[in-house]
Image (spheres, helix red, strand yellow):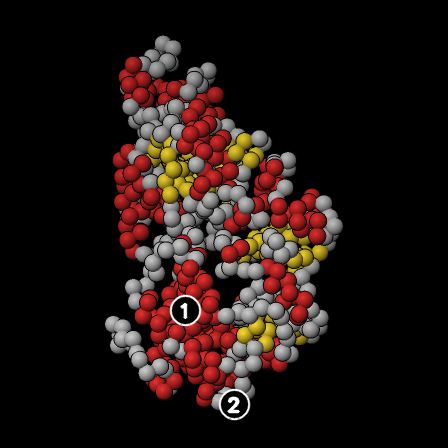
Amino acid sequence: MNRQEMDVLLCIAQGCNENQRALARMTGHSLGVVNRCLHTLAEAGYLNEADGRLTSKARELLENSRPSGAIILAAGYGMRMAPIGTEVPKGLLEVRGERLIERLIRQLQAADVTDISAVVGFKKEAFEYLMDEFGVKLVVNPEYGTRNNLYSLLRAKEKLGGSYLLPCDLWCAENPFRRYELYSWYMVSDAQSEESDVRITRARELAPAKPGQAGARMVGIAYFTPRDGVALRKSMETLEATGLHKNDFWEAALFAGGQPAVAARVVRDGAVSEINTYEELKELDGASVHLRSEALQAAASALGAAVEEIRDIEVLKKGMTNRSFLFSCRGKRYIMRVPGEGTERLIDRAQEAQVYRAIAGRGLCDDPVYLDPDTGFKITAFLEGARSCDSASADDLRRCMKKLREFHEMKLQVGHTFDIFAQIDFYEGLWAGVPSVYRDYETTKANVLKLRPYIEAHAGRKVLTHIDAVPDNFLFYPDGAGEALQLTDWEYAGMQDPHVDIAMFCIYAMYDKEQVDALISMYFEGDCPREKRLKIYCYIAACGLLWSNWCEFKRNLGVEFGEYSLRQYRYAKEYFRLFKAQCPEGLPDVQTRGENGE
């Protein structure tokens, strides 16, 4: 039996046996193909020739082809849904009175699919009720912050064969699931998409889209027979073993390693709506309760507008501490900051507000349009054409260091201090008893603490210091015929030796020693005394450990920063060694020897 004949048989099994035109409409095949399939199925003993009804042979085949279960992928952040995605997982968004994941579960159950697993991660506890109300099994992806859904699916790989596979952010107008499935397929729309990686071949199978050409819009629902499910699982395991596919969707495995061809199940455009953004939710259901986001209500109130006037929402790149989105209101564009996971434990928003009062009107940055010390929400005017500092551009660096030096020379004062060593202990304390991922952490920390006496002996007068003066926070923007420069994101700022800012810039830019020395010389305009250079080396080691501890806390919340976190830990070790080699007299007499003789 070929796929065309299977399509016709499945349609008849679903009750469509009115006439050949109805079968053609439901299968998408021509009348001629449908007519030929009916004759073949009858000759093969699957249909009664007299009335076209299913025979016992057909019923036996179908009963042995029931889907055994379903896997719903619901682990991710839904970052493009900002600001809603920071408040509720996408699968729990309400559309036309139903939560997305609940509607999908009900549609599966209507097709007699009851063995349903949901892979969860972000705000996983919010899905717990599904276990009691729908009998859903929860599978946790602890690395939802750093892995794409290829890894999520691997967490449920034992369920693959004979199961439906689907994302949680779909609204299906009609039930796409069936009591019987005779072959593997992947659902695509009849619309074209520039973002699609697949195309439909003449044989109605999926193939990789050609470079530069639009493909068929990918819906994301799929079904795999038991045999094909085993093949897909092996393909995914092969990709995972390489370590090169952490950011891939599971669909990458469809065409890897000789995976069998998968049929394209084509649905009309609009039959299935994928909800990735606030605007898409608004278009599908303008009355959804989730359009009344706390962040949007705060923005509207701050601007003296109605929530409906907040438009053109566009998610910006996720920051290391916060998430931000761009929006329009009454002809102007703004950026709103929404604090990320665990931020309320890291940032004192009242202190941040004090910093903004201290720098107001000094040409360092535009005053916030709105800043709420309780929620951490912040709104600033959008700088059209702005760009961040290019950490490889000598001209950019000279301007940034000049701006930084001018800020330090203002000698501004606030009522709080950013204590590096206290913060190292504070972030470590947030691990809640979970040991460091680095096996020589205790030795590394002990060595960094040995730098403290030298730092304290050579530290300059404490002034307001940015602390997060990294390349991304220096913004160049058009101003007349040239570019003006601002220093943004002051949430970590406090009283400290201003030379800490130089160290912070270096470790965020992940500079090597030659680049570090060049930046130090640039800040001091070529005249940096030896003791100050050595002090900055100490700051690089201490700040490297500080941000490594910060990364470990965020990792425990499911947020991973890849190479950045590893490099911060390396700065702690390498710049201790560098200081030790250049200034051994600056260390205590008693040395703690680690496995590297440190």
| Nearer to me, 189 or 161 | 161
Disc 1 designates what residue? Answer: 545
Helix, strand or loop at label 1? It is helix
Residue 269 appears in the figure: no
Residue 527 tag number: 2
Helix, strand or loop at label 2? It is loop
Residue 419 picture location, percent across and down:
50, 70
Residue 375 appears in the figure: yes
**How many neighbours does mark 1 have within 10 angstroms: few (below 14), some (14-19), or many (20 or more)?**
many
Q: Height in image: 68 above or below 250?
A: above
Q: Which of marks 2 and 1 precedes in the sequence?
A: 2
Quarter of the image where the C terminus is located: bottom left
**How many neighbours does mark 2 have within 10 angstroms: few (below 14), some (14-19), or many (20 or more)?**
few
Q: Height in image: 168 above or below 329?
A: above
State which mark lies toward you, 1 or 2.
1
Q: Residue at x 61, y 44 (%)?
A: 293
Residue 241 tag number: none
Is 480 positioned to the left or the right of 437 in the image?
A: right
Q: Height in image: 416 above or below 172?
A: below
Residue 279 picture location, percent across and down:
60, 44
| Nearer to me, 223 or 243 | 243
Separation of marks 1 and 2 at Cα, in angstroms: 28 Å
